[in-house]
Image (cartoon, rainbow, N blue to C red):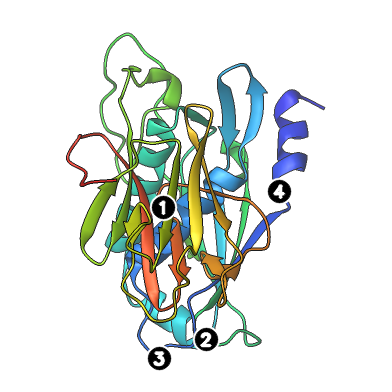
Amino acid sequence: MGFLDNVERGLEKVVTSFFRGTSTADLKPVELTTALRNDMDRGIMPISEGRSLAANDFVVSLSTKDYNTAKGWGQGVVNEMAKVTAEHAATQDYSVHGDIMIHFVSNDDFKPGEMEISSSVKESSSRPAASAPVKERASAPAAPAAPSATPPTTAQPRPTVRPIAEIPKRPVQKQAILEVAGQRYALHHHSIVLGRSASTDIPVDDSGVSRQHARVETRGKTSFVVTDLGSTNGTYVDGKKISEETRIFDGSVITIGQTKIVFRLITSNNGGRA
């Protein structure tokens, strides 16, 4: 059994559940793409110092209503979702074995708004027939392969992408920000408190928010966590109520009261105050 076999056994059971709420609004590609990126972050497997392997095959279970919505997007939209997910892996310096694959599955037990993502590492030989081949490392660019007929499949292929090892690594300065009611707040301090009180670092005008509701802190150079400060109505991360310090990732949604706060890592220093 090779090294990758052991890795596959370790990642093939990574399952993350998400809840969008009971809204009757249709599922949006941006919601699902954010969920895929967050699932990739949660399921990474450290391989060596400074190198982690990420899943490349994602099975998304949806309610019947959301499944029909996703099916209607078409291959072009799903290809773009896979491309954004692959670009996220590149910016995070994750190693990805093969192409990003996204599959949709209908689950009659799910209500609209519920979804579950099962992610795994797949070898090239185990990818569905509709997947696009990964370019081999070569001294000169290879000519594009002619498209070939493939049997029907539920898999959605993504465009051919160079393996992560071939992408030149450039140091990228990331700025952590919080998006609150259309305003961006750059996180320049180790600890940021949010709440209804005007004395907090980021005041939130929401009657459902406690005076000092939640705290966002840095852990090391690249990790960020959120903690509830004993608020009346609780703090939620990606739809789940937290009871202890919880790590957040690019695209994570923090909900306090009726206010949704999006955590972002951006490359430009154009954040607001905080």
User: Does the image show residue 129?
Assistant: no
Of the residues tagged 4 and 3, which is closer to the observer?
3
- Kindly identify which residue carries mark 4: 12
In what element is the residue under mark 2?
A: helix
For marks 3 and 2 on the same chain, the one whose residue lies earlier in the sequence = 3
The single residue placed furthest to the left in the displayed view is: 270
The residue carrying mark 1 is 157
Mark 1 or mark 3, which is nearer to you?
3
Disc 3 target residue: 24
Q: Nearer the viewer, mark 1 or mark 4?
A: 4
In whole angstroms, how far apart are the C-alphas of marks 1 and 4?
19 Å
- Badge 4 marks a residue whose secondary structure is loop
Rounded to the nearest whole Å, what is the CA distance between mark 2 and mark 4?
A: 24 Å
* 183 sits to left or right of 206: left
Q: Position of residue 19 (x, y in %)?
A: 54, 74
In this view, the residue in front, 79 or 54, is 54
- Position in image of residue 82 (x %, y %): 39, 51
Q: Nearer the viewer, residue 70 or 88?
A: 88
Does label 4 or label 3 sit earlier along the sequence? 4
18 w.r.t. 226: above or below? below
Callout 3: few (<14), some (14-19), or many (20+) C-alpha neighbours within 10 Å? Answer: few
Q: Is residue 248 visible?
A: yes
Q: Which residue is label 2 attached to?
A: 64
Q: Position of residue 44 (x, y in %)?
A: 61, 38
State which quadrant residue 30 falls in: bottom left
Q: Is residue 206 above or below residue 6?
A: below
Asked if marks 4 and 3 touch (Cβ < 8 Å), the reply is no
Image quadrant containing the C terminus: top left
- Amino acid marked by disc 1: Pro
